């Protein structure tokens, strides 16, 4: 009933045309703000999904690292226990260290890299092999190691992967872990590797990592047979990551740290979420500004309908009923604006998904259009925000209407 009264007041012709204009301006501002909120949140969702997919190509579901230091020891019995866990699909042993990569055939071109030694299971737990778009993913053996470079590293050391030009032989300089000599040069080792391929994932990886054979890295660093830098695990599709982490943490003990995919990139994900909420807050401020115009429109409507209020009072309407009528008027105004804005945002997002007509300038990103992803919780959040602000803005005019003294002339 209250909404019916509100709808009639909304449609009714006013004595002052300004009331209609202010009401429609208010609805328009709310529509604009809610449309922008949905669009921006959807774009952030799209970029977040894209970044997560790229990072998931390099990072694994679970990673076990030392609680302190750079390396730890894992016995065959411990590895067997990890393998026996029902949620583990496969795992790969890792030996990683910072290194200097040199190409003497290109005028001693060199760059600092993170050299990641992996075993034969690595391509089964990680997506780097699928992202190797030049040459092949081949880490070789301890005697004939191959190296797969990040795309930026390939250019930095001027490596050609054209088979017609032959295989590029590179030099890797690594620190020895257990060197005890006083000569600094004795604490370094040099080894030759053959460039076999290059991967392109994301700039953070492309200009930082190179992947080679784990036994070669352990040999150059002087690591012991059961000594590793990490264990990277791929879980079964239906595995619960949180439960898997808890079980592995209990299994491995306090000397090991178990990290999920999110925890391996916590700073990145937290930054993305913070940016998303900041943008949401900015557009919420626009909604708050629209609330002032709503207060003006409803206050003028209350003055317009003073006689109607008195008639309702004479028919037995209570203050609570009058209050609910004008609260419904404000919520109706906010609802029309929010529904229009959300509908417009959905249409734009669906068109973007189909035609990708809104492009990213510069042409240096992995994709040339803005990705979007519609999430139900975003719609619920924006709708709840618009409804709350509309309710707060309607409260004062509604209270003023309900407190009006009975007067019928």
Image (cartoon, rainbow, N blue to C red):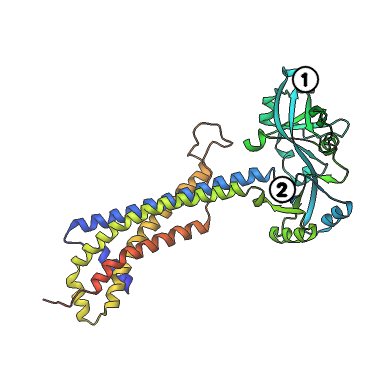
Question: What's the CA distance linking mark 2 and mark 1?
Answer: 35 Å
Instruction: Give percent across and percent down for residue 357.
Output: 48, 39
Residue at 26% x, 63% y is 298
Q: Which mark is residue 257?
A: none
Vertical order, 390 against 38 (above or below): below
* Left or right: where 16 falls relative to 341: left
Are the residues at dot 2 and dot 1 in contact (C-beta closer than 8 Å)?
no
Residue for badge 1? 164
- Mark 2 / mark 1, whichever is N-terminal: 2
Q: Which mark is residue 60?
A: 2
Instruction: Count residues near mark 1 (Cα–Cα under 10 Å), then give few for <14, some for 14-19, many for 20+.
Output: few
Number of numbered labels in the structure image:
2
Instruction: Give percent across and percent down for residue 84.
Output: 84, 58
Placement of the N terminus among the 4 image quadrants: bottom left
Vertical order, 43 against 30 (above or below): above
Placement of the C terminus among the 4 image quadrants: bottom left
The one nearer the camera, 163 or 141, is: 141
Vertical order, 73 against 399 (above or below): above
* Residue 368 seen in the current view: yes
Q: For residue 100, what is the image quadrant?
A: top right
Residue at 75% x, 30% y is 197
Instruction: Give percent across and percent down for residue 389.
Output: 37, 61
Instruction: Give percent across and percent down for residue 339.
Output: 40, 58
Helix, strand, or loop for circle 2? Answer: loop
Residue at 18% x, 70% y is 306
The one nearer the camera, 349 or 161, is: 161
* Left or right: where 144 falls relative to 280: right
Question: Which tag is nearer the camera, tag 2 or tag 1?
Answer: 2
């Amino acid at each position: 009933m209250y909404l019916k009264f509100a709808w009639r007041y909304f449609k009714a012709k006013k004595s002052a045309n300004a009331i209609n204009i202010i009401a429609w301006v208010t609805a328009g501002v709310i529509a604009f703000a809610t449309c922008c909120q949905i669009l921006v949140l959807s774009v952030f969702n799209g970029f977040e999904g894209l970044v997560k997919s790229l990072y998931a190509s390099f990072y694994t579901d679970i990673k076990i690292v030392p609680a302190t230091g750079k390396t730890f020891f894992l016995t065959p019995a411990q590895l067997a226990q990890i393998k026996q866990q029902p949620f583990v699909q496969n795992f790969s042993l890792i030996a990683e260290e910072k290194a200097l990569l040199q190409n003497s055939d290109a005028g001693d071109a060199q760059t600092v890299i993170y050299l990641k030694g992996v075993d034969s299971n690595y391509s089964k737990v990680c997506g780097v092999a699928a992202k190797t778009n030049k040459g092949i993913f081949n880490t070789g053996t301890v005697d004939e190691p191959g190296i797969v470079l990040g795309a930026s590293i390939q250019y930095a050391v001027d490596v050609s992967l054209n088979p017609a030009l032959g295989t590029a032989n590179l030099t890797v300089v690594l620190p020895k872990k257990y060197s005890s000599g006083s000569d600094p040069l004795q604490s370094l080792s040099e080894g030759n590797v053959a460039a076999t391929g290059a991967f392109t994932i994301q700039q953070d990886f492309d200009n930082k990592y190179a992947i080679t054979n784990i036994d070669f890295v352990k040999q150059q660093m002087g690591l012991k047979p059961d000594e590793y830098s990490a264990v990277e695990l791929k879980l079964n599709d239906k595995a619960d990551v949180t439960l898997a982490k808890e079980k592995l943490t209990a299994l491995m003990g306090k000397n090991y740290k178990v990290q999920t995919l999110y925890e391996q990139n916590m700073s990145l994900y937290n930054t993305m979420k913070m940016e998303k909420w900041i943008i949401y807050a900015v557009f919420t401020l626009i909604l708050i500004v629209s609330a002032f115009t709503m207060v003006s429109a409803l206050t003028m409507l209350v003055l317009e309908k003073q006689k109607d209020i008195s008639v309702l009072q004479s028919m037995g309407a209570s203050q609570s009923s009058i209050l609910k009528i004008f609260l419904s008027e404000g919520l109706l105004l906010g609802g029309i604006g929010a529904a229009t804005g959300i509908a417009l945002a959905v249409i734009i997002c669906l068109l973007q998904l189909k035609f990708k007509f809104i492009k990213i300038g510069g042409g240096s990103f992995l994709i040339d259009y803005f990705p979007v992803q519609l999430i139900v919780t975003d719609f619920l959040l924006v709708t709840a925000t618009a409804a709350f602000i509309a309710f707060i803005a309607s409260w004062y005019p509604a209270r003023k209407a309900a407190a009006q003294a009975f007067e019928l002339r």
